[in-house]
Image: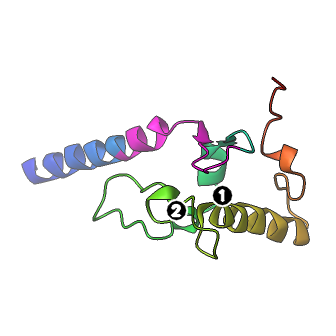
Amino acid sequence: MKRWTYLVVAAVFLIGGALTIALAQSDMVKIENKYPKDLKKPVTLPHKAHASTITCTECHHTWKKAERKTPQKCAECHKAADKGEKGLKRAYHKQCMGCHKDLKTQGKKTGPTTKCSGCHPSKAKK
């Protein structure tokens, strides 16, 4: 009898911990610019909306939860100064716009796909 009680208590703690982690996620995430020339304002996206429809590794493609508690930021691997295929700007655009365009092609609800201003707010003129 005691064994079952311990199992139930352990299960409650595990489920509670998982729910706490899931609910602790920030709703909005700001992707800060790391570019040498700050041409566009940072992108803010609804993290919970994305996390509820795709797996974490679709964006954080090298993240292994067992090795690291939180996912690394894109700029840890993709460098802003790199203008090639693995540069930060190209990585963001390929990942985000590619996914949105795929969803649009499938006739599914999606975010912006073509205009810069769909993701990047306008810069105020100085």
Q: In this view, does 100 lie above or below 5?
A: below
Q: Is mark 2 on a helix, strand or loop?
A: loop
Q: Residue most toward the left?
A: 2
Left or right, residue 74 beside residue 12: right
Residue 81 pos. (x, y %): 57, 61
Which residue appears at 68% of the width and 43% of the height?
38
33 to 62, vertically: above or below: above
Residue 27 within the magenta-colored segment of the rendering: yes
Q: Report the amino acid beneath label 2.
A: Lys
Residue drawn at the location 59% of the way across and 53% of the way down:
51
Which quadrant of the view contains residue 101?
A: bottom right
Neighbor class of circle 1 (other Cα within 10 Å; few <14, some 14-19, many 20+) is few
Q: Quadrant location of the C terminus? A: top right
In the rendered image, residue 43 lying in the magenta stretch gets the answer: no
- Relative horizontal placement of residue 67, taking residue 118 as reference (left or right): left
Quick one: 84 or 13, which is closer to the camera? 84
**Marks 1 & 2, CB-CB < 8 Å contact:** no
Instruction: Look at mark 1 in the image and give the residue it sits on.
Output: 53
Count of marks overlaid on the render: 2
Residue annotated with mark 2: 79
Q: What residue type is labelled 1?
A: Thr
Question: Is 9 or 40 nearer to us in this picture?
Answer: 40
Pick whichever of labels 1 and 2 is earlier in the sequence.
1
Residue at 58% in and 67% down: 82
Q: Which of 79 and 28 is in front in this view?
A: 79
Q: Report the span colored magenta.
A: 18-38
SS for callout 1: loop
Crowding at mark 2 (Cα within 10 Å: few <14, some 14-19, many 20+): some
